[in-house]
Image (cartoon, grey):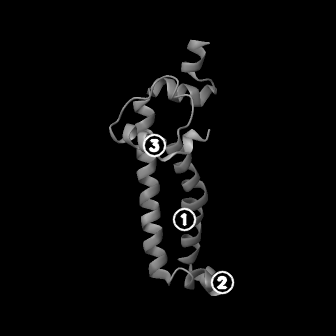
Amino acid sequence: MAADLSWTSLLDSVSKHVHFRRPAAHESSTYNVLQRLTYLAVIFVMFPLMIWTGLAMSPAMTSVFPPLVTTLGGQQSARTIHFFDASLLVGLTLVHIGMVCLGGFRDRVGAMITGRNAAVTEHA
């Protein structure tokens, strides 16, 4: 587990993704370090930031809780941050769909629907 969190492991994972290398059967049944860090960033940084900036753009919320907007530097800053955050989320979604297709669309979607991983059941 500690070896997964090394810089070498992270750079190797980034290299595999950038070069569109299809994951091996044993690699496709677990999340690598890049996937784990990305999911953590999406859940604990990008989604809360999206909600915060969305609320900061609302005049009703701003009148009730002004620090919501002033912390971000005003409504225009909130709009800009919201736009870039939404763009990143859309980009990650497209990359995610591409990686599912690269990893074997039928097997990956089948595993999502049934809860069983085809690569693991074939080797068992």
- Residue at image coords 44%, 40%: 13
Identify the image quadrant of residue 69: bottom right
Q: Position of residue 58 (x, y in %)?
A: 56, 77
Tag 2's secondary structure?
loop
Q: Which one is in front, 12 or 81?
A: 12
Q: Quadrant of the N terminus?
A: top right
The crowding category of the residue bearing disc 2, from other C-alpha atoms within 10 Å (few below 14, some 14 to 19, many at least 20), is: few
Residue 65: give its label.
2
Real-space Cα separation, disc 1 to disc 2, in angstroms = 17 Å
Is the residue 124 above or below the residue 95 in the image? Answer: above
Q: Position of residue 5 (x, y in %)?
A: 56, 45
Looking at the image, is mark 1 or mark 3 nearer the viewer?
3
The crowding category of the residue bearing disc 3, from other C-alpha atoms within 10 Å (few below 14, some 14 to 19, many at least 20), is: few
Q: Position of residue 6 (x, y in %)?
A: 52, 45
- Give the residue type that dot 3 points to: Thr
Could you tell whether 83 is left or right of 28 in the image?
left
- Compare marks 1 and 3 and give the one earlier in the sequence: 3
- Give the residue type that dot 1 points to: Met
Q: Which one is in front, 99 or 24?
A: 24
The crowding category of the residue bearing disc 1, from other C-alpha atoms within 10 Å (few below 14, some 14 to 19, many at least 20), is: some
Count of marks, rendered view: 3
Which residue in the structure is indicated by mark 3?
Answer: 8
Which residue in the structure is indicated by mark 1?
Answer: 50
Q: Are marks 2 and 3 in contact (CB under 8 Å)?
A: no
Q: Quadrant of the C terminus?
A: top right
